[in-house]
């Protein structure tokens, strides 16, 4: 399988886990080697590898699911390249982390009544 070759060749490299996952999913769906795809690759250019609009939707949903992003949260994003998809996932992750930090900070400020 192409992704097994990719994963074994990237050992020792410091790469972005989001980019790695996106490339792996694209390789599985489009039957293209992950090293033939980079952040600048236009997703429409992958059509000749079998990545039509329906399959592209599957790629986006699987990538989102891999990172705990709800279906539809990435669909509205302007995603034309591999890099756009990576950036959309990273943006959603950042937003989620900020929301979680804000919730924790508000919870720590709550004054709890002391037991009598």
Image: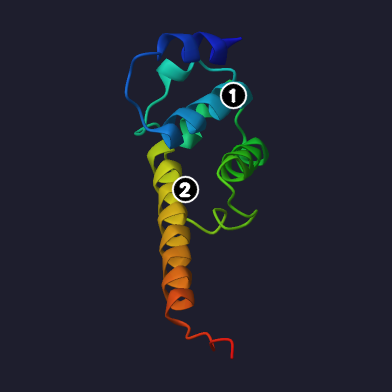
| Numbered disc in front, either 2 or 1 | 2
Q: Quadrant of residue 59?
A: top right
In percent of width and height, residue 57 lies at: 63, 43
Residue under the image location 42 percent in, 23 percent down: 37
Q: Is 13 situated above or below 110?
A: above
- Ranked by sequence position, the earlier of labels 2 and 1 is 1
Q: For mark 1, what is the residue?
A: 30
Between residues 104 and 60, which one lies in front from this camera angle? 104
Residue under the image location 65 percent in, 53 percent down: 71
In percent of width and height, residue 50 lies at: 62, 25
Residue 69 left/right relative to 19: right
Q: For mark 2, what is the residue?
A: 89
Residue, far front: 116
Residue 98 left/right relative to 24: left
Residue under the image location 38 percent in, 39 percent down: 83
In percent of width and height, residue 103 lies at: 48, 71
Between residues 63 and 107, which one lies in front from this camera angle? 107
Residue under the image location 63 percent in, 39 percent down: 62
Quadrant of image for the N terminus: top right
Q: Residues within 10 Å of mark 1 (few under 14, many from 20)?
A: many
Secondary structure under badge 1? helix
């Amino acid at each position: 399988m192409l992704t097994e070759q990719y994963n074994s060749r990237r050992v020792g490299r410091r790469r972005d886990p989001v980019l790695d996952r996106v490339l792996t999913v694209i390789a599985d769906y489009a039957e293209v080697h992950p090293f033939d795809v980079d952040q600048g690759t236009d997703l429409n250019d992958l059509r000749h590898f079998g990545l039509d609009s329906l399959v592209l939707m599957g790629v986006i949903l699987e990538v989102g699911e891999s990172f705990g992003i709800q279906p539809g949260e990435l669909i509205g994003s302007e995603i034309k390249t591999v890099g756009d998809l990576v950036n959309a996932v990273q943006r959603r992750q950042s937003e989620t982390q900020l929301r979680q930090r804000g919730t924790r900070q508000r919870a720590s400020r709550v004054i709890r009544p002391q037991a009598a």
